[in-house]
Image (cartoon, helix red, strand yellow):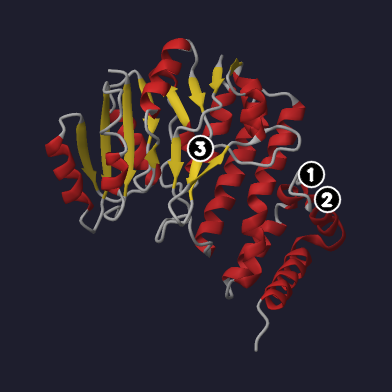
Amino acid sequence: MKFSIIIPVYNGEPHLQHAIQSILPQDFTDWEAIIVDDGSTDATPQIAEALASQDSRIRVVHQSNGGVSIARNRGMDEAQGDWIVWLDADDSYVDGALGQIAAMADRYSACNCMQFPYQERNPDGSLRPCIPEAYSAYGGQVHPGQEAFRILFAHNGLKDANWQPWRFVYRRDSLPRFRERVIHEDVDVLPLHMATFSSVYIAQEAFYVYQPAREGAATTIITPKRVWDILDVTAHVYGTLQEARLPHDLKRNFQATLAFNLFGYYLATPSFAEPERSRLLKAFADHPEWLLAIGTPPRTAWLKRLLLRLLGVRQTAILVNRLQTLSKSHRNPTT
């Protein structure tokens, strides 16, 4: 069997059928789809079983709610395909995607994994290609794992986070393993895992359709719990990075990527209620190197870095929060 498509889902009643319907008409048919129902409390289990009853290539695994990392690991344990791909239950594949990915897998069979950009669905249903410079400049080529890591995650001046699981296709013997009960399981594992590979193919084509800001998704709203989660992940990745056998410049540039990713969560902390606000700001203050590592885009990174050096973590957070409040007031004046 060529592909195992792993679909972790929790309360995906409004979306799951659409995701599966993007697979069924594909002109490539040598696949299995494994729906991992992570303890859903809506009609997801019934929908999944109904879909499986209509096509023998679809299997359903039910488990008590454990989080997306456990669901992804369970799907990998159940998979029988030569190559593993992921499909989130609220997303879809473009027409003909599996056939094109299969052709890539045949041509680059020695690669540990393949990685590709994506399309984003707009509110009106139209699609917007999301093809960062890393793919347009370096796509269509095979790269050593460290070089692919540099291109996608540690390029000096990198503007994009390219670590979502559904952008990867893994050869079965090269699969990652996710830490359990971690929400940001992608950045936690996938970039440094790629750096250990002998070869990675970076595609230029966008095979996947991402649905942003789904209502109720774990990563839609920034809450104190979510910020604690990303802090935990950042600490774990920083610790792992120190032990990794990577050149110094790659480590430095990846630290900047992590810091850029972290900064948005950091900016949200002043708006939280006490005592979480103070606890979170203290956690950032205990690790100023995370934020001081910002030396790459966005364009205001130099200013943020200067503020951090001059004012410190706490005062920078307060200042930026005030500026954001003033900016919102200016855009939406009361009448």
Relative image position of residue 186 (x, y in whole percent): 50, 40
Residue under circle 1? 295
List the residue tagged with mark 3: 118
Q: Nearer the viewer, residue 70 or 1?
A: 1
The secondary element bearing badge 2 is classed as helix
Q: Quadrant of residue 255?
A: top right
Q: Secondary structure at mark 3?
A: strand
- Spatial distance from mark 1 to mark 2, Cα to Cα? 6 Å
Check disc 2: other Cα within 10 Å, few if <14, some if 14-19, many if 20+. Answer: some
The answer to whether any part of residue 197 appears in the image is: no
Q: Secondary structure at mark 1?
A: loop
Quadrant (top left, top right, bottom left, bottom right) of the N terminus: top left
Q: Is residue 48 left or right of residue 261?
A: left
Disc 1 residue type? Gly
- Spatial CA distance of label 3 from label 1 is 27 Å
Q: Inspect the image, locate mark 3, and give the three-letter code of the amino acid beneath it.
A: Tyr
**Residue 297 position (above or below residue 332):** above
The label shown at residue 302 is 2
The residue at the point 78 percent across, 67 percent down is 315
214 left or right, relative to 78: right
| Disc marking residue 40 | none
The answer to which of marks 3 and 1 sits earlier in the sequence is 3
Amino acid on which the number 2 mark rests in the picture: Trp
Q: Quadrant of the C terminus?
A: bottom right
Q: Looking at the picture, does residue 279 appear above or below residue 158? A: below
